[in-house]
Amino acid sequence: MTHRFVKANGIELHYLEKNTNLKPTLILLHGLSANANSFESYLELLNNYRVISVDLRGRGLSEKPNKGYSMQEHSKDIIELMNALKIDKAILVGHSFGGLLSAYLAVYFPERISKIILIDVAAKMHPEVRKLVTPSVMSRLKKSWSTYDEYISNMKKAPFLQGKWLPEMEFFYKADCKETENGIESRSNFKHIQQAVEAVLNPDIHWEELITQIKQPSIVINGTEPFVNNQVLVSKQYAMETVNMMENCKYVAVAGNHVTILFGEGAKQTVSAIKKFIN
């Protein structure tokens, strides 16, 4: 795995890459406040393709401009990254926010996207998405911890990780934090991520209408286990409705919740479904 940087859409983007000379190219797009390392387990298992996992703007080691967190700007970032790396066409693998971004790219840049894999995302949002995501995922962006050990200890207490912590999860959390004069803090800025939330909930983007326009072969991979408050973030009903909106899409259920689907058994099952779909 190699760390690289590229100038795209006027900012510097950081990405992880393996198998530079192989084809096809898979571009992995992470969740709302995550980073490229959230796909660490997938990167280990995806051996027969060129794989690029991007830190989206404002996350990880990518540049953090104060503005530009709309779907349009995120999309331009990815297309210009592809241009800079001379990638004509790519298969997109998007988790959560990254899944919506993948759908957006598939519709607005169809000539550049050959297939899409949507991981635990649907055209309809959970009716209480803000209540479920804000305290459990966004709260860490406003906090600081005196030591790294205290930070990790707190991350392990997240409701969606209770009894589910795996050593490889630390790659993501380690990449998420930095040392500051206040202690250990997330690299992501709450205000920037809030702009991305508003971009997803933008009433001008009709996700159901947009997803019906996807022509590329697709799969929706759905985590079947509860996320918080004993609720799944993406229900099977919403996932199946999303599958049926597309011309050429299949549904795959895997073990894990909205986060653990990225690690351990969830990652193995997901990567197995990805390989089967691509091949």
Image: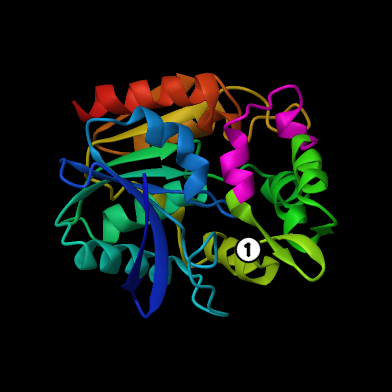
Around disc 1, counting alpha carbons within 10 Å, would you say few (fewer than 14), some (14 to 19), or many (20 or more)? many
Is residue 222 positioned above or below 11 on the image? above
Find residue 94 and report its horizontal and vertical position in percent: 41, 45
* Colour mode of the rendering: rainbow
Find residue 97 and report its horizontal and vertical position in percent: 51, 51
Give the secondary structure at mark 1.
loop
Q: Nearer the viewer, residue 26 or 96?
A: 26
**Which residue corresponds to mark 1?**
188
Give yes or no for residue 77 being in the magenta stretch: no
Q: Is residue 152 left or right of residue 84?
A: right
Q: Is residue 23 left or right of residue 223?
A: left
Is residue 257 positioned above or below 196 on the image? above
Q: Quadrant of the N terminus?
A: top left
Q: Nearer the viewer, residue 118 or 173?
A: 173
Query: Residue at (54%, 73%) from the top-left corner?
Result: 64
Query: Residue at (85%, 56%) from the top-left corner?
Result: 146
Query: Residue at (53%, 29%) from the top-left corner?
Result: 263
Q: Quadrant of the C terminus?
A: top left
Kindly tell me whether residue 49 is visible in this rendering: yes
Kindly tell me whether residue 210 is visible in this rendering: no
The span picked out in magenta is 157-174
Q: Amino acid at mark 1?
A: Ser
Give yes or no for residue 165 being in the magenta stretch: yes
Q: Nearer the viewer, residue 56 or 165?
A: 165
Q: Quadrant of residue 91?
A: top left
Find residue 245 and report its horizontal and vertical position in percent: 35, 39
Q: Is residue 159 left or right of residue 27?
A: right
Q: Nearer the viewer, residue 38 or 208?
A: 38
